[in-house]
Amino acid sequence: MTTVQSPLLRAARREATDYTPVWFMRQAGRTLPEYRRLREQYDFFTLAQQPELCARVSLEPVKRLGVDAAIIFADIVTPLLGIGVDVKLVESVGPVVSSPIRTLEDLTQLRELEPEQDIAYVSETLRILRRELPETVALIGFAGAPFTLATYLVEGRPSRDYTQVKSFMYSEPRVWHALMERLSAITITYLTAQIEAGAQVVQLFDSWVGWLGPADYAEYVLPYSQRIFQALRGRDVPLIHFGTTTAGILELMATAGADVMSVDWRIPLDAAWERVGTEVAIQGNLDPVTLLAPREVLRSRADDVLRRANGRPGHIFNLGHGLLPQTNPDEIAALVTYVHEQSQQYRQQGAA
Ligand code: CP3
């Protein structure tokens, strides 16, 4: 068996690395100038359907920021668009669905995904990226988790409190479970296609799941996350499970079966790691707002994350949620260098 060269892949498997690998959620697009220029010419999905341009968007942060991974440029609603759901990404708002799902009949909108016909551009983008990326930089694929996709499909648009999707879940449990079944099947097909096209790690984004209490999470969401990770398990690709505001459901989330748990800043990294168990790797957990803070504040928060990880194999440095659009790319690049240098020194000093 050949040794894995990429520090991020090694960390995801809890193997020792010379320094702590780092990448940022929402590093492709959002903050970087080349992306902004492309978006002046194309709307989001026109851009997202052109593999050469998508690959450029994904490669830009690798070159400019020095991160240890590239993430494919797409959106969580990409597979829904692929099967013909009328969804638009509205500027400064997010995904807006023209006919929200309320009844069993509405589920006919959600047919099975056929990757070759529906989202061939995603696979093509991944193949280009695998050719272009050095072996040391990992290629991350991703999908939205069923609950997070359902928030948009049921509410019709981004929500502040998820009142509609939660009351739907309580009052129409049969439709809810049928909806989650369909979304799970689509997600498994979508992530499998990404792995077959060259994704070396995949992340399941359950961004809004922390709005559920533990009993609701266990009943309405967990079985589907388990099903997804179970289906992907045999492929030797590390699986990352992401959510925000998840401090109340962390142990339950960990039973879904991912290799890496991604946590936000509302819980200290070491406390989170303890709770999910040290037989999984951990990702996170810097507050994205610290990148807008004076550099000494940013550095002290980054130090704190590294100290809590304590040089233990299996930490991927990241934010607790995505980069904020107004973040200065020079600050991000400086943070990458800082994390690499500090974590290397920390290992050399032989942390306890
Ligand atoms: O990480 C990356 O940079 C890769 C690309 C990526 C996009 N969306 C492109 C995008 C990823 C990983 C996503 C994930 C995504 N999309 C999530 C999960 C992560 C999270 O932040 O919780 C969610 C909830 C969405 C839904 C979504 N898409 C929203 C709420 C919005 C509007 C707000 C915003 O700017 O993010 C989008 C639009 C979107 N998706 C943009 C990008 C670069 C910005 C819009 C644009 O360029 O016009």
Image (tube, rainbow, N blue to C red):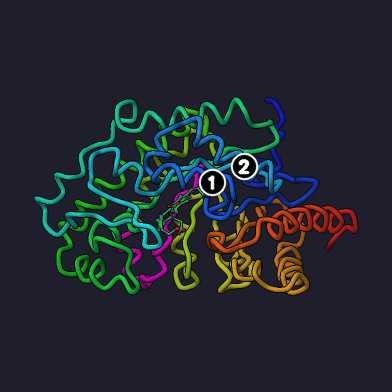
Left or right: 310, with 229 as reference point: right
Q: Position of residue 35 (x, y in %)?
A: 54, 46
Where residue 305 appears, as percent x and y from the top left, is 70, 66
Q: Is residue 166 left or right of residue 338?
A: left
Occupied quadrant, residue 215 = bottom left
Q: Residue at x 26, y 52 (%)?
A: 180
Question: What is the CA distance from the residue labelled 2 to the residue labelled 1?
Answer: 8 Å
Find disc 1 in the rendering and name its residue: 35
Q: Is mark 1 within 8 Å of ligand 1?
A: yes
Task: Name the image quarter holding the N terminus.
Answer: top right
Q: Secondary structure at mark 2?
A: helix
Ligand 1's image quarter is bottom left
Query: Would residue 211 be counted in the magenta stretch?
Result: yes
Mark 1 falls on what kind of element?
helix
Check disc 2 and give the amino acid type.
Answer: Glu
Q: Are marks 2 and 1 in contact (CB under 8 Å)?
A: yes
Please tell me which residue is depicted at 67% across the width and 51% down the height of the picture. 22
* Residue 171 disc label: none
Q: Residue at x 43, y 60 (%)?
A: 207
Query: How many other residues sit within 10 Å of disc 2, few (<14), some (14-19) or many (≥20)?
Result: some
The residue that mark 2 highlights is 60
> From which residue to which does the magenta span run?
200-221
Examine the image and state in which quarter residue 278 appears: bottom right
Query: How far across and down, in percent of the image, does residue 282 sit?
Result: 61, 56
Q: At x 62% / y 28%, what residue is drawn? A: 132
Q: Amino acid at mark 1?
A: Tyr
Instruction: Mark 2 or mark 1: name the one nearer the start of the chain.
Output: 1
Q: Is residue 110 left or right of residue 94?
A: left
